[in-house]
Amino acid sequence: MSLIELPSPNFNERKAPPDMVVLHYTGMRSGRAALERMCDPAAQVSAHYCVDEDGSVYRLVPEERRAWHAGVSFWKGETGLNDVSIGIEIVNPGHEFGYRDFPAPQIDAVIGLLDAMRGRWDIPDHRILGHSDIAPERKEDPGERFPWKTLAEHGHGLWVTPDMPPEGTMGPPLGPQDTGLGVFSLQAALGKLGYNILAGGPYDAETSTIVTAFQRHWLPDQVGTELEGLADARLRVTLMALLRHISLMEA
């Protein structure tokens, strides 16, 4: 894979080898504007790579160094995830400037990057995440149009399609102000997966935000529908299937 070198000054030293990949969209009007921002010392932001819509790949920060892409972040008890992650910015205007599908050459380039970097570092599938997973209260990217399923089909990240129980056996969706064991179990499972949530209390705004982040990654067809932010049977079954899959991988 051909890389275009475009060094950014916005990096520092790592404290540990990377074992996570965080995918972003640029969320700006153009790829050029995003590259200029990530190379501007005053902006104090960067990523290791930026992948343009035509599949061009820019290397801004060496993988051995700590780029500044994750910000305030959390996953599975860890904070400050710039320390342990490789950041890939993917050119797309995002929700603010005309969110659109990611072209095939761009996704092919992302897959090629993942092929190469996972040959250099020990990065498990369950630590290939979106910015919205590690900072759901602040971020939506790379969003519900990003083809996580395609990445998983090429060996990168997690995707499950579990068998569903008979219709009507799991009750209505859980939603705002619901309480009880179902909400507790949902919150506990989301926390076990990695999200920054504690079990207990009602189905509040924080729970809804994290459910939406889960949907953006694993149930994108629910985003923008009446199910956005609600935990229906399909979501709960998918969540448990992911946890089982990770447990088998770690056994």
Image: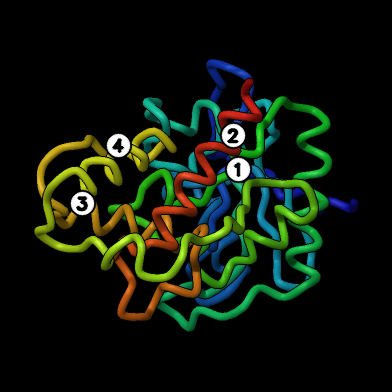
Whether residue 72 is visible: no
Vertical relation: 210 (above or below) 108:
above
Q: What percent of the width, then of the height, locates residue 17?
A: 63, 20
Kindly indicate the quadrant of the structure image that contains residue 178.
Answer: bottom left
Q: Is residue 3 left or right of residue 12?
A: right
- Neighbours of disc 4 within 10 Å: few (<14), some (14-19), many (20+): some
Q: Mark 3 falls on what kind of element?
A: helix
Q: Position of residue 210 (x, y in %)?
A: 32, 52
Tell me which label, 1 or 2, sits earlier in the chain.
2
- Name the mark nearer the viewer: 1 or 4: 4
Q: Could you tell whether 243 is left or right of 209 in the image?
A: right
Q: Is residue 14 left or right of residue 214?
A: right
Can you identify the residue that label 2 sits on? 20
* Amino acid at pointer 1: Ile
Amino acid tagged 2: Met
CA distance for labels 3 and 2: 24 Å
Q: CA distance from mark 4 to mark 3?
A: 13 Å
**What label sits on residue 213 in the rendered view?**
none
- Residue tagged 4: 188
Q: Residues within 10 Å of mark 3 (few under 14, many from 20)?
A: some
Residue that mark 1 sits on:
128
Residue 234: name its quadrant: bottom left
Residue 159, horizontal then vertical, whole percent: 62, 53
Q: Earlier in the sequence, mark 4 or mark 2?
A: 2
Q: Is residue 166 left or right of residue 55?
A: left
- The mark nearer the N terminus, 1 or 3, is 1
- Image quarter of the C terminus: top right
* Contact? badges 4 and 2 (CB < 8 Å): no
Mark 3 / mark 2, whichever is N-terminal:
2
Residue identifier under label 3: 206
